[in-house]
Amino acid sequence: MRVKAIDNSVFKMLESERDRCIRVIEKIFSELENLPRGCLGQRKVKSGGKVYIYSCLKYREGAQVKFEHISAQRAEELRPVLERKKKLQNDLKASRKRAATINHILQKG
């Protein structure tokens, strides 16, 4: 009976990919720290029989949700920044999942 030798090249490749994922996660974290927190929203205020709509930045402070009123111009400036933040959060989630899967495979090997 012949015993096959273990090919370590696949494990080296997986370790390299795991290390790359960890570097990506760290880079995304550092970039997310510099972006504003919260998301854009609108608040409706009824006053004098009229309804006024204001742009606001919603975020959590502990258990409370805070609303920071912002100008329409600032809301337009923040929109692409917050879209980038959302994309980075999705990338972070995918990278974490990929790294966890690779760790699981490497532990079994």
Image (cartoon, rainbow, N blue to C red):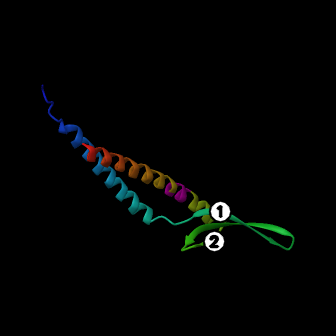
Q: Residues within 10 Å of mark 2 (few under 14, many from 20)?
A: some
Report if the CB atoms under discs 1 and 2 are less than 8 Å apart.
Answer: yes
Q: Position of residue 79 (x, y in %)?
A: 58, 58
Could you tell me which residue is drawn at 51 percent across and 66 percent down?
36
Q: Quadrant of residue 14?
A: top left
- Secondary structure found at label 2: strand
Q: Nearer the viewer, residue 43 or 61?
A: 61
Q: Which residue is labeled 2 in the image? A: 67
Q: Quadrant of the N terminus?
A: top left
Kindly identify which numbered label has been placed on residue 1. Answer: none
Q: Position of residue 33 (x, y in %)?
A: 43, 66
Look at label 2 and name its amino acid.
Phe
Marks 1/2: CA distance?
9 Å
Q: In this view, which residue lies farthest toward the right?
A: 49
Look at label 1 and name its amino acid.
Gly
Task: Work out whether 45 lies above or below 18.
Answer: below
Could you tell me which residue is drawn at 51 percent across and 55 percent down?
86
Horizontal side, residue 108 vs residue 58: left or right: left
Q: Nearer the viewer, residue 5 or 78?
A: 5
Horizontal side, residue 27 vs residue 55: left or right: left
Total number of numbered discs in the rendering: 2
Horizontal side, residue 93 vs residue 64: left or right: left
- Secondary structure found at label 1: strand
Q: Position of residue 6 (x, y in %)?
A: 17, 36
Q: Which residue is labeled 1 in the image? A: 41
- Is residue 78 at all visible to an observer of this figure? yes
Per the rendered image, the range of residues in magenta is 80-85
